[in-house]
Image (cartoon, helix red, strand yellow):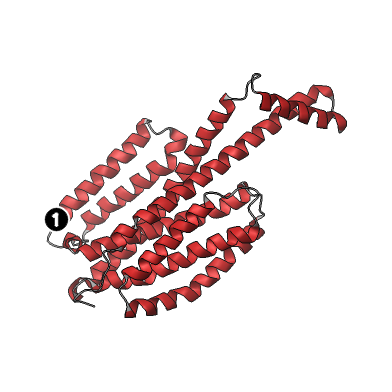
Amino acid sequence: MDWTGLVLVSIFMFSLLSGLSNGSREGWGSDVIVLYFVTAAAAVIGFIIWESFTAHPMLNLKLFANLRFASGCALSFVWGAGNFGLWYLIPLFVQIVMGYTPTKAGFLLMPAGLLLAFVFPLTGRISDWISPRIPIVIGLVMTSFSCFLMAGADTNTAFWVFGWWLIVGRVGLGFVFPPLTTGSMRALPPEQVSQGAGMMSFSRQLGGAFGVSFLATFVDLRSAHYAQSYIATQTSGNSATMEFLRTFKSYLAQAGTPEVLQMPAALQQLGQAIYGQATMLGFREGFLVAALVFFVAIIPGSFLVKGKND
């Protein structure tokens, strides 16, 4: 067992994910977050150096000399990041922004998940007949388009419209995974398959952890940015703001609310409206980033062609 390699990669993962998860709370320039990222960088560099010279490496770095396998690992990382990251964001989006109950959010996700179970064996069979890159590129385009559509969602988006967008993206991910796995493994000679399979699984799981941490942090930062931008415009010179406060105070007066409570209640309602709008825009940018990542992933996906080992 390569205990040194295991310790180094564990330190890398712990430091990287801890830095991403705690950056918003501690501050991205704080000493503890900088220490996390410096430790992660030092650990991964040390891991690469150690694995290059040790007699019995945990990971044979020569695997990455194979362009098809290296492309498969990169794409496996993206697949994990997108799959886990999106399925973390979407339930939060529909509950926080669109006001769905947890049960309704579950019903929204269910059709796409059930359909994925039928897509996996179908695309696995198709990838036996044609070049893996064909279903992979199709799936990445579908998933990217789905994320792009979700980037335009708001509180008025219909339940089944959003559901169809989810189905397109989920089916797209189903088109990617089976040919990605088979195409990457077939690129390796038999003696490297066991380490290659482990590396593919590690890339996917690391991508999942990274995707959740990164997208959650990104949405949080962008939401805070929009909230601060909106708050800065809420002045007495903003006619829309003043009209909103007057209208809401009038509504409260008609409802019998004491005059002393009308302005605080109106300001609270204004704050909630600002928070809701800022949060929606933050989530929408998160979906847009996911769309861009899946589209760029077409580049490594195009290298997974049939080769001499197929």
Q: With respect to residue 20, does 299 lie above or below?
A: below
Pointer 1 residue: 52
| Residue extending farthest top | 237
Q: Amino acid at mark 1?
A: Ser
Horizontal relation, residue 9 to residue 234: left or right: left
Residue at screen point 66% across, 19% down: 236
Residue at screen point 74% across, 29% down: 265
**Which type of secondary structure does the marked residue at label 1 adopt?**
helix
Q: With respect to residue 132, does 214 lie above or below?
A: above
Could you say which is closer to the camera, residue 269 or residue 157? 157
Whether residue 72 is visible here, answered yes or no, is yes
- Residue 290 lies, in percent from the top left, at 43, 51
The part of the image, by quadrant, that contains residue 237 is top right
Whether residue 74 is visible here, answered yes or no, is no
Could you say which is closer to the camera, residue 284 or residue 193? 284
- Residue 285 lies, in percent from the top left, at 48, 44
- Residue 90 lies, in percent from the top left, at 54, 54
Residue at screen point 62% across, 40% down: 276
Residue at screen point 47% across, 36% down: 25
Could you say which is closer to the camera, residue 113 or residue 196? 113
Q: Quadrant of the C terminus?
A: bottom left
Q: Quadrant of the N terminus?
A: bottom left
Figure label count: 1
Q: Determine crowd level at label 1: few under 14, some 14-19, many 20+ residues with C-alpha closer than 10 A.
A: some
- Residue 192 lies, in percent from the top left, at 20, 71
Q: With respect to residue 305, does 257 lie above or below?
A: above
